[in-house]
Amino acid sequence: MIIPIDTLVAVADGTKCRLFRNRGAEPHVVLHELPDVDIDSHNVGSGMRHRSASANPDRSRLEEDDYASSAAALLNRMVLEGQVENLVLIADPRTLGEMRKHFHAATSEMLIGEIAKDLTGHAVDAITDALGKAR
């Protein structure tokens, strides 16, 4: 995957979202982490449409779905405000699927790559390596 300069790289799971900008020219990816973003997932209603049952057994999953929906809303806003020209999303498979459901059409168009892997707790080097292997 070619990652142009200034591409936004979002690394998310059901509880955290880290944002990076690529400052390196191809073939080098140099990620600079942006300040932490405040994502308020209260009363979003994404996961709350599900009932707790055997298919969705606990409240924490519902809260993770709400957080993923809120993270998608943040990315949507950034795209619609012109802050994003290219987007790469790295998230665990469940979060990735939930975020996709909530992407605006413009956000989907800006998406140049996805990696279904949980890297939120990893160092920048591990994220850079994952991007390099995804090519």
Image: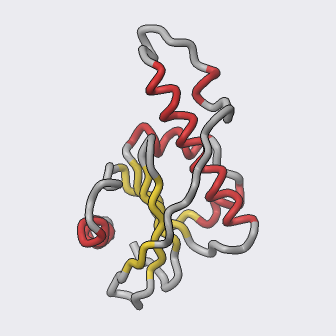
Vertical side of 76 occupied by 133: above or below:
below
Depth check: 35 or 11 in front? 35
Vertical side of 104 occupied by 128: above or below:
below
Q: Is residue 68 left or right of residue 108?
A: left
Vertical side of 64 occupied by 87: above or below:
below
Which colour scheme appears in the figure? secondary structure
Q: Quadrant of residue 81?
A: bottom right
Spot occupied by residue 103 in the image (x, y as percentages of width and height): 64, 50
Q: Quadrant of residue 82?
A: bottom right
Q: Quadrant of the C terminus?
A: bottom left
Spot occupied by residue 44 in the image (x, y as percentages of width and height): 67, 35
Q: Quadrant of the N terminus?
A: bottom left
Spot occupied by residue 70 in the image (x, y as percentages of width and height): 61, 45
Depth check: 27 or 59 in front? 59
Q: Is residue 130 left or right of residue 9?
A: left
Vertical side of 109 occupied by 39: above or below:
above
Question: Image point 49% across, 85% down: which residue?
Answer: 5
Question: Image point 24% across, 66% down: which residue?
Answer: 126
Question: Image point 44% across, 26% down: which residue?
Answer: 60
